[in-house]
Image (cartoon, grey):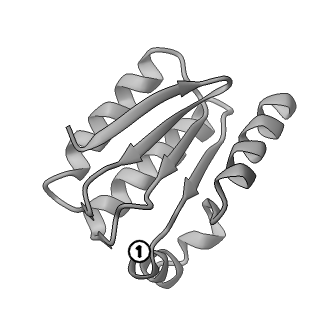
Amino acid sequence: MDFKIDKKDGYTLVQVLNNRLDTHIAPELKSELVLIFSEGEKNILLNLDACTYCDSSGLSAILVANRLCKNANGTFVLYGLQPAVEKLIIISQLDTVLNVSDDLSVAESFMNNSEIEN
């Protein structure tokens, strides 16, 4: 599997283990995200620190996660963007739509604070 999924207190941490989030990986990620939500989760922290490449299908998977969280009144946070992936997020102006953190403890505290607010 190209992902590691850890249930945490108040959210689920999804770590992409592959260095590419592309047409070969994104459909599987979308399926995993839908499964996570079907089990009642509404808060996702997506760790991309191992991912050095992302294409439009990868962005689509990220947006699916964001939409699922919003529809469930939850929180979606991206963590650990590598330079090429961060550049793609900025160029596509998704940095204005998505919650992005470079620091895991900040991302986790954001998830915990959002859980209190929701």
Say which residue appears at 29% left-offset and 68% top-offset. 56
Say which residue appears at 66% left-offset and 41% top-offset. 75
Say which residue appears at 42% left-offset and 54% top-offset. 62
Total numbered badges shown on the rendered structure:
1
Q: Is residue 51 above or below residue 44?
A: below
Q: Nearer the viewer, residue 27 or 10?
A: 10
In the picture, residue 115 is in which quadrant?
top right
Quadrant showing the C terminus: top right
Q: Is residue 8 above or below residue 101?
A: above
Q: Position of residue 112 (x, y in %)?
A: 77, 35
Whether residue 70 sits left or right of residue 82 in the image: it is right
Mark 1, Cα crowd under 10 Å, few <14 / some 14-19 / many 20+, is many
Residue type for callout 1: Val
Which residue appears farthest toward the top when viewing the image?
39
Q: Nearer the viewer, residue 78 or 40?
A: 78
Quadrant showing the N terminus: top left
Which residue appears farthest toward the left when viewing the image?
24
In the picture, residue 4 is in which quadrant?
top left
Whether residue 40 sits left or right of residue 15 in the image: it is right
Q: Position of residue 19 (x, y in %)?
A: 26, 63
Q: Is residue 39 above or below residue 1?
A: above
Q: Position of residue 61 (x, y in %)?
A: 35, 51
Secondary structure category for the residue under label 1: helix
Q: Nearer the viewer, residue 109 or 21?
A: 109
Q: Is residue 24 above or below residue 41?
A: below
Whether residue 57 sits left or right of residue 90 in the image: it is left
Look at mark 1 in the image and give the residue it sits on. Answer: 85
Q: Position of residue 17 (x, y in %)?
A: 30, 50
Say which residue appears at 43% left-offset and 58% top-offset. 48
